[in-house]
Image (cartoon, rainbow, N blue to C red):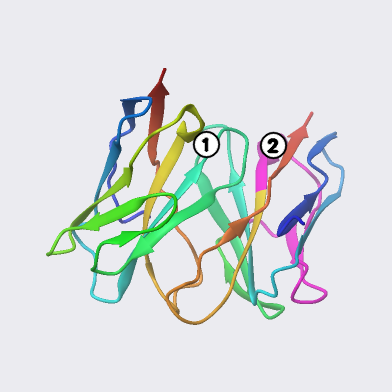
Amino acid sequence: DTAVSQTPKYLVTQMGNDKSIKCEQNLGHDTMYWYKQDSKKFLKIMFSYNNKELIINETVPNRFSPKSPDKAHLNLHINSLELGDSAVYFCASSQDGGPNTEAFFGQGTRLTVV
Amino acid sequence: DAKTTQPPSMDCAEGRAANLPCNHSTISGNEYVYWYRQIHSQGPQYIIHGLKNNETNEMASLIITEDRKSSTLILPHATLRDTAVYYCIVRVVPHDDKIIFGKGTRLHILP
């Protein structure tokens, strides 16, 4: 069983479109994240949710809207896609409390805006 | 911004120990040292973490200096599958809700 799963794995779309990436974790974790990895391979945090509540929004354009229907899911909706949104997006989850809070990452969604 | 400094790349012969250094000279007392790696096109994978004592698990060993200003990740018998980018991260737990990745070290395992 995949601990953190993202769909789709690849997404090619035109500028101006609206798209969503879904993320689900079956680990019972309280915290979920979205990261963006650009062409220079820098991994940057975008959002962090804890028990469905937004904790961190790292100055991401408001075209990006995360939605957490329950604590096992954190979806990423992107409006009016731009060329610069092309990147690999990773979802992750971790359990709160204590030092043993390793994060588990999904396999990524490669978004290409044309 | 990442609070760690790592060499951009390293080579290691297959079967030998790979020793990856990390400098975290501004680490504070409640920050842990974490290591993750990212194999090409995959999501980052947790390796190990520690506070001040050396740690070992099935994947690697973590050696933290007594002053905690630097650490070394050791892969005891490197294989080709260990070729990846390795990230050293400092993180306050449990209050820190984000993992800040730096540029990491690209480790090449040579056959």
Q: Could you give the CA–CA distance between mark 2 and mark 1, rounded to whole angstroms?
A: 12 Å
- Residue A63 visible to an observer of this rendering: no
- At which x and y percent is residue B56? 34, 58
Q: Quadrant of the C terminus of chain B?
A: top left
Q: Residue at x 80, y 76 (%)?
A: A70
Q: Are marks 2 and 1 in contact (CB under 8 Å)?
A: no
Look at the numbered disc 1 and give the secondary structure of its residue: loop
Circle 1 sits on which residue? A41
Q: Residue at x 61, y 48 (%)?
A: A36
User: Label 1 sits on what residue type?
Assistant: Lys
Residue farthest toward the left in the current orientation of the protein: B67
Q: Is residue A15 magenta?
A: no
Region of the chain picked out in magenta, as a range: A60-89
Circle 2 sits on which residue? A86
Q: Quadrant of residue B79?
A: top left
Q: Taking B34 as reference, is A44 left or right?
A: right
